Amino acid sequence: MKKLAVYALGGNALQPPKAESSSSAEVLARVMSDVIDMLEMDWTVIITHGNGPQVGYLMEMDGDGVHSLESWVAATQGMIGHELSMNLQGILQRRLRPERTAVILTRVLVDGDDPAFATPTKPVGPILDSKTVMSADWDIAQTIHGPRRVVASPKPLQILELDVIRKLVELQAVVICGGGGGVPVVDREGHHLGVPAVIDKDLLSSRLAIDLKADALIISTDADAVYTGFGTPKAKALRRLSVAEAMKMDEAGEFPAGSMAPKVTALCSYVGVLNEGQAIFCTPGSVLDALRGESGTAFTVS
């Protein structure tokens, strides 16, 4: 029986719609290489992805706020899913492989009473001018780049398209789903309604890997490992990290809240709940080495 991996890709690795970036193209090529390498090693792969730069650009174009945030999340799932699918499908066909790609618009149930809604902290969209700051009916916070809209980042509770994803995996599809953490919805008397929030992509990927009992959760990002003292002369790469060690370091503030901390939490949650499987943090293009323990960081139960 084939092993199943959830491969979580950051949105910054994908070219924003208004930019031309050879480095982004190179990263995407390495991601495609990872997926093909795993398929040829008899893995089944599900790809999840971020969408921060892409949503920000679309919101900037929609200066009057005609469309809701959750609509833009859904739109980028289609845009990015299309890009990934077109690139990957072409390679699969050239190599005469049997797999086909499938892009799934993914909705994720959240709790309308999640504490995150009371204290929104997730920046979205462009830097705001003073006129917008004064007139907009949004939560706004000062960031290092200037004032930005902030929204809640609630925990993912249930992936509404989970059964569809599972069936497509059984049909040997490379499923691309969970874009931007999924479209957040709440349950209102049996009806699902979108809410202006952003679910962390890595936490959603962990939820998906747990629900499908995946054999591996791989978080692919621009850092080659989890570090202590990152950005300092005492920086040290950690090649193996137990859940207990990682959570202790997180509580001590070792991992930045907006970047590394959710990735560490996602990998720890996956390992902690399933008590098995490979939880890997690595750079695009190095997945097979990371699975063998030769690069990246592996999270373990103990």
Image (cartoon, helix red, strand yellow):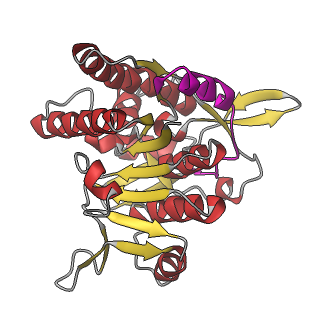
* Residue closer to the observer: 285 or 151: 285
Percent position (x, y) of residue 30? 21, 39
Q: Residue furthest right?
A: 189
x 19%, y 34%: residue: 29
Residue in the image at 26% along x and 55% along y: 289
**Residue at the left extreme of this rendering:** 22
Q: Residue furthest front?
A: 1
The quadrant holding residue 108 is: top right
- Is residue 64 at all visible to an observer of this figure? no
Q: Nearer the viewer, residue 298 or 112?
A: 298
Left or right of 121 in this view: 59 = left
Q: Residue at x 65, y 28 (%)?
A: 161
Residues shaded magenta:
150-174
Q: Which of the 4 quarters of the picture holds residue 227? A: bottom left
Q: How many marks?
A: 0
Q: Is residue 18 visible?
A: yes
* Left-right relation of 155 to 112: left
**Viewer-proximal residue among 132 and 15:** 15
Q: Is residue 248 left or right of residue 186?
A: left
Percent across and percent down for residue 69 are: 53, 33
Instruction: Left or right? Give the position of 243 relative to 13.
Output: right
Report the residue at 62% width, 46% height from top: 213
Residue 59 is covered by the magenta coloring: no
Query: Relative to the observer, which residue lies in front, 35 or 130?
Result: 35
- Locate residue 111, reporting x and y percent: 75, 47
Q: Is residue 42 above or below residue 300?
A: above
- Residue 186 placement: quadrant: top right
Whether the magenta-drawn stretch holds residue 163 is answered as yes
As drawn, 190 above or below 218: above
The percent position of residue 73, horizontal first and vertical second, equals 50, 31
